[in-house]
Amino acid sequence: MTAAEQWIAFVTIVRKEVRRFLRIWMQTLLPPAITMSLYFVIFGTLIGSRIGTMGGFTYMEFVVPGLIMMAVITNAYSNVVSSFFGAKFQRFVEEILVSPMSNNTVLWGFVLGGVARGLLVGLIVTLLSLFFTDLNIQHIGVTITIVLMTSVMFSLAGFINAVFANNFDDVSIVPVFVLTPLTYLGGVFYSIDMLPEFWADVSRLNPMLYIVNAFRYGVLGVSDVNIGVAFAMVGVFTVLAYAYCMYLLRSGTRLRQ
Amino acid sequence: MSKALEIKGLRKTYGNGFEALKGIDLDVNEGDFFALLGPNGAGKSTTIGIICSLVKKTSGEVRVFGKSIDDDLANAKKDIGVVPQEFNFSSFETVWDIVVNQAGYYGLSRSLAAERAEAYLRQLDLWDKRKVASRMLSGGMKRRLMIARALVHEPRLLILDEPTAGVDIELRRSMWTFLADINRRGTTIILTTHYLEEAESLCRNIAIIDSGEIAENTNMKALLKQLHREVFILDSTACLPEALSLPGYAVERVDDHMLEVALEKGGSLNEVFRLLSEQGIEISSMRNKANRLEELFVSLLAKK
Ligand SMILES: Nc1ncnc2c1ncn2[C@@H]1O[C@H](COP(=O)(O)OP(=O)(O)OP(=O)(O)O)[C@@H](O)[C@H]1O
Ligand SMILES: [Mg+2]
């Protein structure tokens, strides 16, 4: 296929992916909007007022960046894992497998679908947060770059999960049992400076900590950790996940018998 | 004549160790209408799966219009349109989206995709259903949707895995006309079916595959010539005698009013009727016991 034809194929997948999550917005866009609004009400307003400030910010200001990031991560991941697994489960992934488009076209088509949902949900949550606090983004470049890189990385990870998933349980295991807890423990609700030394060190092994803090740095201008580490880590994981996805597609693992 | 499909020494052992193809060779000429027949589990779908890269071959060679699926897969794929045995489209998408998106996967522009989708949906009588989610189609409509989807990029080789399974007679006949027409316009067609009548009326060449091996590969005429025996079912007006025999013919009394007569090739039906009327038996109607190809098929597989 020519580059122009690959582009058409790519746009076809992206359009289909975006239309999919818009069509089922009650399952894709509404739940994070509701959950995050509840977080804002409970932690920001009800409890936050008793907690006082954290690192010089109101508690609401402090938790908002982490919550936005959490929404972006879980939605980017969930979109790709459920969409690609659905295609595998109903076998219409075969429509793609018999076509002449390249593995890169397939992969980036699905990844962009995940990124689109991650960013849209991130935007919705950000807009909702404006009812509770003001956002004065300190470093717009850092903020946008880390959101984009993170959503790409988790979309790729979602793709890997979808390839290996055998049933719908396998699709929700990672978001529920890995991503959400790691994000909760990754300094969304507290600064790790508040933790005893041991638990602060344990927290430093949690990759989500770096991502949440890099984003918080972009928005508030403060971070518990060196944000260079966040970029390096997300960059390395993205490259590794990409290479692994391409290997899976090329070898046809779990896709071609 | 150039070859639409060349298969050499194709083997497939599935992950569980089952050997589904034991080294098959198969050639299909460009422009042919080719039948791939065989009992359940023979390896037809496995062969088709390998041609369109849904199944990974264990060894052997496959070329589509000279393009090897090992070295030039993307170009080989462009020439293939496949209608699988099982439904494999998204149940939530509309008929229109399914066909247009498939065109997109082949790199067709949106406008060309829409033009082709309209043409094929109309030809396959699905135009009125274009806005309907695929899960709301009947079984026969789903089959036709898969045919429209397989044709939208106008492949040179169309492969259909049991396209008429579960399709009513009227619709089946209209599908035959449609396929014959596509074939006449130059598309090579490979078809698997369990309706041998279908293969007999549509296909010029035929391969019979059994337990992962090619049992027969010839043209339809030559195959039918091999047929030595034909069985007729005769209905008599009156009750048949208990002891019934026709000298020189294998005859069987099925019930009081029905008998079966086997006729060797070149035998005369007139002679049968003469012998029957001698015994005072009057025949009111007669029919072929089975499709001729079906008989041949059974005997070919039994020989093995
Ligand atoms: N994924 C698989 N793993 C293991 N064995 C398989 C797999 N798919 C098919 N087989 C086996 O391979 C053999 C050939 O199957 P195939 O689907 O090619 O048969 P077929 O000729 O298409 O039959 P049918 O007329 O029933 O569609 C069967 O014995 C089947 O059980
Ligand atoms: Mg089959």
Image: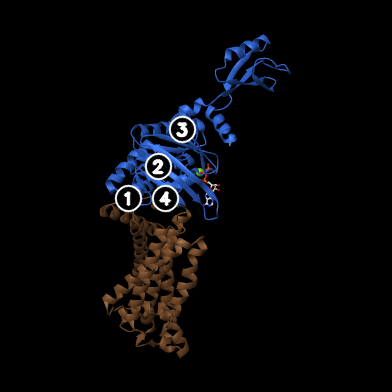
For label 1, the SS is: helix
Mark 2 is surrounded, within 10 Å at the Cα level, by few (under 14), some (14 to 19) or many (20 or more) other residues, namely some
Q: Amino acid at mark 1?
A: Gly
- Marks 2 and 3, how far apart at CA: 15 Å
Q: Chain of mark 3?
A: B
Do marks 3 and 1 share a chain? yes
Indicate left or right for A162 with A131 as reference.
Answer: right
Instruction: Name the residue beneath numbered marker 2.
Output: B6
Q: Chain of mark 1?
A: B
Do marks 3 and 4 share a chain? yes
Q: Amino acid at mark 3?
A: Thr
Looking at the image, the residue that sits furthest to the bottom is: A197
Relative image position of residue A66 (x, y in whole percent):
38, 77
Residue at image x 42%, y 50%?
B53
1 vs 4, front mark: 4
Chain drawn in brown? A
Name the disc covering residue B104, or none. 1
4 vs 2, front mark: 2
Q: From this viewpoint, is residue A20 visible?
A: yes
Nearest to N terminus: mark 3 or mark 4: 4
In the rendered picture, chain B carries what hue?
blue
- Marks 3 and 1, how far apart at CA: 38 Å
